[in-house]
Image (cartoon, rainbow, N blue to C red):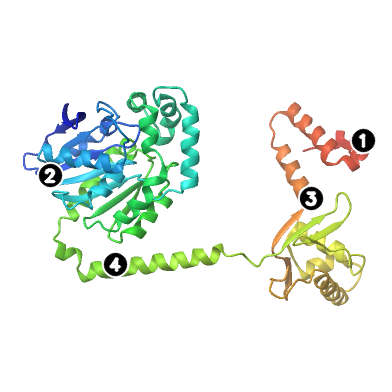
């Protein structure tokens, strides 16, 4: 362990030589906000087999001074560049987790980035919705209000940032959060760095590997993969059975994937712009363009009807908010509609058997045809909206968003039936009957001893 001094700020670092005497490259390990260099403890034994290691604490984290003035991505990136220069680091790769990825992305755009060979980003929230990010930040501020460290936040996060944290991992994380003051943490914990990072990501000309934990609830892989939109030469892998701190959850697998990525990308710039790479860039670009188009189409308002059918306190029907009062007293319109609301769809022969069992099948089909024509007329909607009643040659169905008070109550009873405690189940049922079925309370009161749920 050692320190370098920059503008009266001591930066705490550790440099570890590789176990391989022939190794000439160094991995620069950058931790996330709230953590410290020890978040890399579990993976370092696997890294040192092929690389030397340089890890350090960000300002205000671990053993590094916080310094005066506001801390931001530019200042912390300058710290990193100063550290690389002072220690005369040769060929290197940046491996950055969480917030640390912002520093790696910015440094990769510097002309004075020295001999950067590749950039590995793990759980880096480059594109994060501002409204959600601000809300999370405010919630965390409330938790640590009046306290002098982020320990309470660490206690809340420890089981989220790791898939199955061991006692050793818990101790590492809580010790790190205990050393970070809230003012330092919240200067860096917000979504305001994303716009610049997305722009910088597009300018990077070194190979990029993006890793995400399959169980990450903080920055899920389906969101992380969107970063491929900003750099078509980046690779993306999802690490199984890992959460936000994938280097702690899967140190062996992550170290292996990083090593293989580095080895594969030891190519010249001429190879990077080969025809094969250009084809991949065009293919990826077109694919994402098509996906965005499909998502845009999907997000447009759907031409769907919304039907509300109530029967428990009097029969009423509303279609797209408008009440339909006429036409229900003939052609079995009311009965047919309720049957379809409950069944969703039915064959024509089934409807004939249910509603006209006393007549011949041919006669029943004729009556059904007339009744469906009438019901369709009652439910008639404007031409630009899909018909809600579909009467095919074999099946009859309702399409759209269908609601019914009867269906809601039946679903509620099914939920009550799943309550394991019999006394509690009876209590819920009694309350349910007395409130939801108030108009029929007398009947249910006389019958409830025989009701089994």
Q: Which residue is mark 1?
A: 446
Q: Nearer the viewer, residue 51 or 344?
A: 51
Instruction: Tell me the CA gap for discs 1 and 2.
Output: 83 Å
Q: Residue at x 29, y 37 (%)?
A: 31
Q: Residue at x 31, y 50 (%)?
A: 210
Mark 1 or mark 3: name the one nearer the start of the chain.
3
Mark 2 or mark 4: name the one nearer the start of the chain.
2
Mark 2 surroundings: few (<14), some (14-19) or many (≥20) residues within 10 A: some
| Label 3: which secondary element | helix
| Label 1: which secondary element | helix
Mark 4 or mark 1: name the one nearer the start of the chain.
4
Residue 192 horizontal/vertical position (percent): 40, 46
Q: Is residue 220 left or right of residue 260?
A: right
Q: The C terminus lies in which quarter of the figure?
A: top right
Q: Which residue is mark 3?
A: 405
Q: Nearer the viewer, mark 3 or mark 2?
A: 2
Q: Nearer the viewer, mark 1 or mark 2?
A: 2
Instruction: Tell me the CA gap for discs 2 and 4.
Output: 29 Å
Q: Nearer the viewer, residue 134 or 408?
A: 134
Badges 2 and 4: C-beta atoms under 8 Å apart? no
Q: Which residue is mark 2?
A: 25
Mark 3 or mark 4: name the one nearer the start of the chain.
4
Mark 3 or mark 2: name the one nearer the start of the chain.
2
Q: Is residue 406 left or right of residue 246?
A: right
Instruction: Tell me the CA gap for discs 3 and 4.
Output: 54 Å
Residue 166 horizontal/vertical position (percent): 36, 27
């Amino acid at each position: 362990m050692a320190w370098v001094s920059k503008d009266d700020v001591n930066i705490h670092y550790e440099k570890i030589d590789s176990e391989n005497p022939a190794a000439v490259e160094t991995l620069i390990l950058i931790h996330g906000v709230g953590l410290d260099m020890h978040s890399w403890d579990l993976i370092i034994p696997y890294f040192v087999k092929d690389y030397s290691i340089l890890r350090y604490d960000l300002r205000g984290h671990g053993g590094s001074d916080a310094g005066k003035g506001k801390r931001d991505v530019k200042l912390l990136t300058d710290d990193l560049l100063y550290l690389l220069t002072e220690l005369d680091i040769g060929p290197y790769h940046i491996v950055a987790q969480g917030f640390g990825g912002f520093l790696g992305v910015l440094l990769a755009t510097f002309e004075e980035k020295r001999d950067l060979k590749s950039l590995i980003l793990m759980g880096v929230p480059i594109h994060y919705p501002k409204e959600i990010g601000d809300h999370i930040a405010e919630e965390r501020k409330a938790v640590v209000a009046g306290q002098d460290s982020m320990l309470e936040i660490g206690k809340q996060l420890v089981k989220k940032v790791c898939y199955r944290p061991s006692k050793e991992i818990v101790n590492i994380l809580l010790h790190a959060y205990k050393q970070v003051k809230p003012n330092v943490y919240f200067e860096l914990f917000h979504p305001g760095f994303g716009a610049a990072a997305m722009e910088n990501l597009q300018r990077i000309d070194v190979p990029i590997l993006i890793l995400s934990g399959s169980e990450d609830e903080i920055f899920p892989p389906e969101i992380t993969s969107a970063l491929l939109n900003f750099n078509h030469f980046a690779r993306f892998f999802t690490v199984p059975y890992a959460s936000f701190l994938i280097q702690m959850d899967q140190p062996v697998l992550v170290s292996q994937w990083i090593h293989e990525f580095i080895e594969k990308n030891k190519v010249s710039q001429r190879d990077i712009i080969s025809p094969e790479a250009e084809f991949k860039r065009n293919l990826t670009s077109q694919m994402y363009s098509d996906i965005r188009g499909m998502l845009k189409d999907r997000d447009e308002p759907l031409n769907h009807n919304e039907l509300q059918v109530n029967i428990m306190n009097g029969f009423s029907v509303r279609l797209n908010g408008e009440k339909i009062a006429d036409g229900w007293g003939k052609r079995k319109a009311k009965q047919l509609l309720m049957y379809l609301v409950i069944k969703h769809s039915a064959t024509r022969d089934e409807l004939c058997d249910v509603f006209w069992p006393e007549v011949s099948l041919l006669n029943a089909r004729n009556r059904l045809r007339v009744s469906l024509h009438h019901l369709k007329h009652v439910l008639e909607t404007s031409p630009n909206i899909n018909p809600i009643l579909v009467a095919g040659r074999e099946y009859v169905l309702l399409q759209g968003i269908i609601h019914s008070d009867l269906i809601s109550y039946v679903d509620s009873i099914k939920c009550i039936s799943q309550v394991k405690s019999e006394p509690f189940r009876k209590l819920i049922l009694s309350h349910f009957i007395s409130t939801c079925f108030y108009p029929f309370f007398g009947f249910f009161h006389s019958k409830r001893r025989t009701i089994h749920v």
